[in-house]
Image: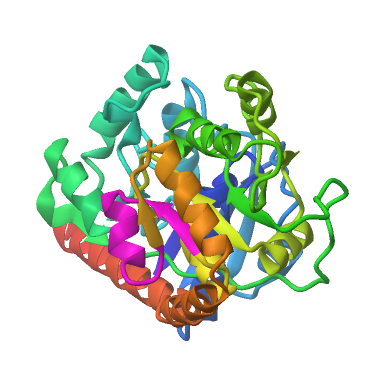
Amino acid sequence: MNVVYDLRYATDHFPGIGTHAHALLTALLALPGKDRYRVVWGESDRTTRFDLDVLSRHPRVDWTVVREPSMGWNAVVATGGLLRRLGGDVYLSPFYLRPLGAPMPSVLTLFDVMYLTPVPGIPAGVRLRSWLAMRRARGAAAVITSSEFARGQLIEHGFPTGRIHVVRLALPPVRPGAAQRPPRAPERPFALVVGINRPHKGLRTLVNAWKSFGAEGPLDLVSAGPIDARYPSLADLAREAGAAGTHTLGAVTPGELEWLYANATLLVFATRHEGFGLPLLEAAGRGVPVVASDIPALREIGDGVARFVPPDDALAWSSAVRDLAGDAPARTRMAADGRALAARHDYAAVAARTRDILESVARTAERAAS
């Protein structure tokens, strides 16, 4: 099987999607077999997180640097033209843009339909572009998603039931290299929030929870992740609310993130909407207790492991943080349960299931052509 693998979404612009894109390709290449992967990378793409030389030199990889954009108004047309030039049996993308005029079937990845739901703070233009892209994605030969909750939402929005495949994500392997303390990490014990500062991530709720602690809470709050200039950062929200004990680090290196996980007392995950919730699994795998929003996708993944709180109830969050910060035995139990949860999510299994889907799609296309 000749697979065109779109790695252009493993840039720093796509924190979670990029992590999955890199981990999945690495795991696919570790499977036994003779499948070849034409891996597409943009000539202007950049990543500070991954060593691409290892992938580009793999004996079953045809590394292909292209000019065509992965995003923007003409991305679906440009990628379709690219695929007509490259050929192959099936196109696999860790994103949801379906190329126009591709000569082979497309397998897309769609973690959630958040932009089609009434989540506050999403601009109308973003909703419209997402609606158009999602409508086109319905015609893909297969769509991979990461939870039964996300599958149900896709079906509600018109995706064909038989083409949706649930493949739960796994804990990406920890990249080699010593953990490094971020320059602005606090001296006091802290709770960690990982992710971008978009409105649905619940940073305002966390700031209000920390405001309720007054001058000195049980833990400081540290935010690590890219900052989207369109939305207020944790620092902006804390300044506006007058909340003390918060620290905004912005994007951090893999080594710095490992240090933060290794030293955090808790992970707080106040998101309003997720299709999976990778930070929950990342923290659990490192033995960090998790306080998470009580939303369907996080319940599906972390039930029995995380402590769940209503997503927008700042007082409930402050109470949960204070209680767990002062309960070392509970944190020890949660750490053990979290490691056991993460051990059940393995990228080798994710890759094997994904390859089965690719082979099924390629066989169906071959039969249709004969």
Closer to the camera, 43 or 292? 292
- Dividing the image into 4 quarters, which one contains the N terminus? bottom left
The residue at the far bottom in this view is 32
Residue 212 higher or lower than 338, as above or below: above
Q: Position of residue 105 (x, y in %)?
A: 30, 50
Q: Dividing the picture into quarters, in which one does residue 95 lie?
A: top left
Closer to the camera, 224 or 15? 224
Question: Which residue is drawn at the image coordinates 24% and 60% (left, top)?
Answer: 165
* Res 107 seen here: no
Question: Which residue is drawn at the image coordinates 47% and 36% (left, top)?
Answer: 202
Q: Position of residue 340 (x, y in %)?
A: 44, 83
- Dividing the image into 4 quarters, which one contains the C terminus? bottom left
Total label count? Answer: 0
Residue 268 in the figure: left or right of residue 157:
right
Closer to the camera, 185 or 286? 185
Closer to the camera, 291 or 283? 291
Residue 31 higher or lower than 208, as above or below: below
Q: Give the extent of the magenta segment.
A: 290-306
Query: By what rule are the colours in the image chosen?
Result: rainbow
Residue 269 higher or lower than 35, as above or below: above
Q: Position of residue 336 (x, y in %)?
A: 50, 82
Question: Which residue is drawn at the image coordinates 45% and 83% (left, top)?
Answer: 33
The stretch drawn in magenta includes residue 329: no
The stretch drawn in magenta includes residue 292: yes
Question: Which residue is drawn at the image coordinates 69% and 40% (left, top)?
Answer: 45
Q: Dividing the picture into quarters, in which one does residue 353 lie?
A: bottom left
Q: Position of residue 47 (x, y in %)?
A: 72, 48
* Res 265 seen here: yes
Residue 259 higher or lower than 152, as above or below: below
Residue 233 in the figure: left or right of residue 90:
right
Residue 182 in the figure: left or right of residue 268:
right
